[in-house]
Image: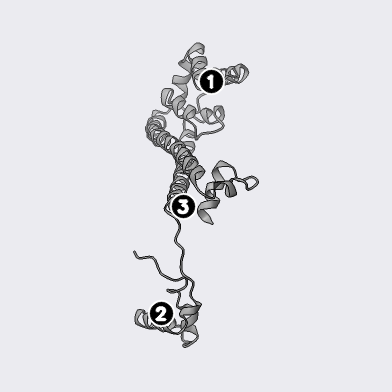
Amino acid sequence: METPLCKGFYNTLPYREAFTHSGAKDDPTDAFLCMDFLQRHCDKLKPIEPDTRHTRHIQQLVEHRRSLVADRIRVTNRLTAALKLYFPQVLDWFEDKGTLVFCDFVERWPDLKSAKKARKTTLEAFFYEHNSRYSNIIAQRINAIKTAIPLTDDAGVIQPNQLYVQLQIRILRELIIAIKNYDEMIATEFKKHKDYELFSSFPGAGPTFAPRLLAAM
């Protein structure tokens, strides 16, 4: 698609309304009005200054990241709904569902029965490996796991939802990794941009919103 040469060149609505009040429109008429406006009022048109390649790069990265974040929310909502049917306790053990530690835990212990069978030392090692260093929080989680009561033992509910959860966990893991990669790419490209100092100076903008403001403005 070719870039329009002038701002407002294709917006014929106000110009059309000046000559007809019926509201009727068609492509030949709009083409004629565009040509007529260009011939009579060329001095009123302002040349478009397209964004730089670098700005377009950041715009695409920011837009893709927003789409991935929306996908992550949809997947965590599906996980929450499915887990509530057979393994709701794990939702209380992890406040943030969009994390790798949550994915790893559910993947390793996909139901309450398997989690309760895990040794205390195994659970402690798992949390330490995932940078959970507060011993009191680890102890609370392990105690919650060991004292939890199953919501249901109906295999007709557990097995289908467990299969669905494992699929969603794999999708969520890929989304988390992808978003992290996008964050790193956006940060790198943003720092190279000629307007980096300006947009990064905005109060409260931060590493996420500053590039989005640049892309929008």
Q: Nearer the viewer, residue 74 or 34?
A: 34
Q: With respect to residue 205, does 165 lie above or below?
A: above
Name the kind of residue labelled 3 in the image: Thr
Q: Quadrant of the N terminus?
A: bottom left
The local crowd at label 1, few if under 14, some if 14 to 19, many if 20 or more residues have their Cα within 10 Å, is many
Name the kind of residue labelled 1 in the image: Ile
Name of the residue lying farthest toward the right: 203
- State which mark lies toward you, 2 or 3: 3
Q: Nearer the viewer, residue 44 or 79?
A: 44
Left or right of 40, for residue 143: right
Task: Residue at 46% x, 15% y: name it.
Answer: 117
Q: Going from the N terminus, do you reach mark 2 or mark 1 first?
A: 2
The local crowd at label 3, few if under 14, some if 14 to 19, many if 20 or more residues have their Cα within 10 Å, is many
The residue carrying mark 2 is 34
Q: With respect to residue 130, does 10 lie above or below?
A: below
The residue carrying mark 3 is 55
Q: Going from the N terminus, do you reach mark 1 or mark 3 first?
A: 3
The residue carrying mark 1 is 145
Name of the residue lying farthest toward the front: 194
Q: Nearer the viewer, residue 81 or 183?
A: 183
Left or right of 114, for residue 124: right
Q: CA distance from mark 2 to mark 3?
A: 30 Å
Name the kind of residue labelled 2 in the image: Cys
How far from the left and from the top, in percent, is residue 42?
A: 46, 79
How far from the left and from the top, in percent, is residue 9?
A: 44, 74
The local crowd at label 2, few if under 14, some if 14 to 19, many if 20 or more residues have their Cα within 10 Å, is some
